Image (tube, helix red, strand yellow):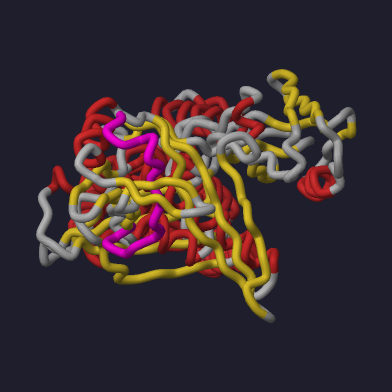
Amino acid sequence: MIKEVLKQWRVIVLILCLFFSFLAIGFNLDTSGVAIASVEEGTIAQLAGMQGPAQNLNLIKRERILSVNNNLINNIDDYSNLIRNLGNITTINIQTDKGNYLLINDLNNTLGIEVKEVASSNIRKGLDLQGGTRVLLEPIEAVTDNDLKDIVDVMTSRLNVYGLSDLSIRAASDLEGNKYISVEIAGATKEEVKDLVAKQGKFEAKIGEDIVFVGGQEDVTFVCRHDGTCSRIVDCVEVQVGSYSCKFEFEISLSDGAAKRHAQITNDLSINLSQGIGSYLERPLDLYLDDRLVDSLLISSDLKGQEATRISISGPGLGITMQDAIDDAVFNRNKLQTVLITGSLPTQMEIIKLDSISPLLGEEFLRNSWVVGLLALLGVVFVIFIRYRNLKIIIPMVITILSEIFIILGLAALFKYNLDLAAIAGLIAAVGTGVDDQIVLVDQVRNKLVKREDSVKKAFFIIFAAFAATVAAMLPLFWAGAGLLTGFALVTIAGVTIGVFITRPAFAAIIKILLKD
């Protein structure tokens, strides 16, 4: 009987789909070490040649750190403890599964590497299941589809400056035609996301009312982001009791066009002589971020009429403790550097919805999803047992249900789709639809009043009608809720399509053979 089942072409198609799904999921048994999730630009890790993974790289193929200074790394705790205890070690040797890297420590113990647990498969967890921040943005002004694409590109560039790889930025719209930008970043806080993506990031350097240069690669050709060389935190002092101030400095290089504008504007300025301070031009270089004055820099008289291509940018950092002031200076510096590198958005953005999920809560969601899925499966098996009390029917049904789930997961891994709670709900809905169709098939095959061949055809007519109705009901959800329900609609449609064209025809062929006696 088994040989007869395996000869059925529908069953062969199902087995092939299961095999390719297995390859796409790519189960990984070696999870030693920690996986490199991102490498921040301008840090000692990036200067040593380390790079973050590409967004389309399979999870199990991400580079893994195996040891630091010959100390084996088994998990994230091992890695964190070693990095925290680097102390005054000047060189750091990191061995990965793809090579060795020698890092010159700047003694700030900020390697610029974000690590995660080594993935056991290529199945990607969405924000709901791994923690992070999701923000829904709406342009204040009317924008075109090309404008939305530009916004997505600038935002992606901003986040790539920080080496972030586990992120999703996409344009979305609702049924009323309103346009949005949806941003999901794993492991980021609300404040980081708000400052990185919600602000327009319009940077202008002015002398009086004349613009010398603006943020973006057209005017700014290089921004130093490497601590200790041309980017520093200096002048940390206690301003008054319970109030500290620091200052950040970093160098940038200007394009020839920006340098010529600097020469033309400064050529007409007079020189002020200040005893004990030096000689400077009568007007400073004012730095504006989103039309707010960030800092004013005195311009040395030596730069009058000169095409300066390399200048120093500075700004403040404040806090109630010295460390708070340093952290604020670093945060302000990083934000300003990012805007200088990427430029401004085409328009200002308004935050419509902002959600933050902790990694611990994400793990709880994942565990609950497994429990709910298992309980749903057991409930279905129990109902089927009460209905038929026949293992020849129950076992193929359970195998078909599990096959549909496995193939859906294989497709998600193949197309690198992040599974979130909405997608899991769609998975359960698709499986539930499949159980209904299998019951229709079994009942038609068991009907002794109709020829079995005709009964199966009649059953598939019902199944295709239900399939069309399900797809039609899911299509509006691609736009409903500004795309937040896309996962539910997409997985449901994928599930019922796999069922109608792959698993349920195979189930029908199996049932016809098993029940022919």
Whether residue 26 is visible: yes
Within the magenta stretch, is there residue 290? yes
* Lateral position of residue 256 relative to residue 372, left or right: left
Q: Is residue 336 left or right of residue 187?
A: left
Residue 360 point in image, percent of width and height: 65, 65
Residue drawn at the location 62% of the way across and 34% of the way down: 229
Q: Identify which residue, 360 or 93, lies in the foreground.
A: 93
Q: Quadrant of residue 294?
A: bottom left
Q: Extreme right residue here?
A: 71
Location of residue 122 (image quadrant): top right
Rendered location of residue 80, percent (x, y) = 79, 48
Q: How many marks?
A: 0
Residue at (27, 41) in percent of width and height: 213
Question: Can the viewer see residue 458 in this picture?
Answer: no
Which residue: 80% across, 30% down? Answer: 92
- The answer to whether residue 333 is magenta is no
Q: Which residues are magenta?
A: 289-306
Instruction: Pick whichever, 429 or 129, lies toward us.
Output: 129
Q: Nearer the viewer, residue 358 or 412?
A: 358
Residue 504's place in the image compared with 295, above or below, is above
- Residue 261 drawn above or below residue 317: above
Taking the view exactly as shown, the residue that stands out farthest to the top is 99
- Give the residue drawn at x 41%, y 32%: 310
Which quadrant would residue 34 be assigned to in this image?
top right
Query: Residue 507 in the image: x percent, y percent?
Result: 43, 43
List x then y, in percent, for residue 207: 26, 50
The residue lying furthest to the bottom in this view is 241
Give the left or right position of residue 256, taking residue 392 as reference.
left
Quadrant (top left/top right/bottom left/bottom right) for the N terminus = top right
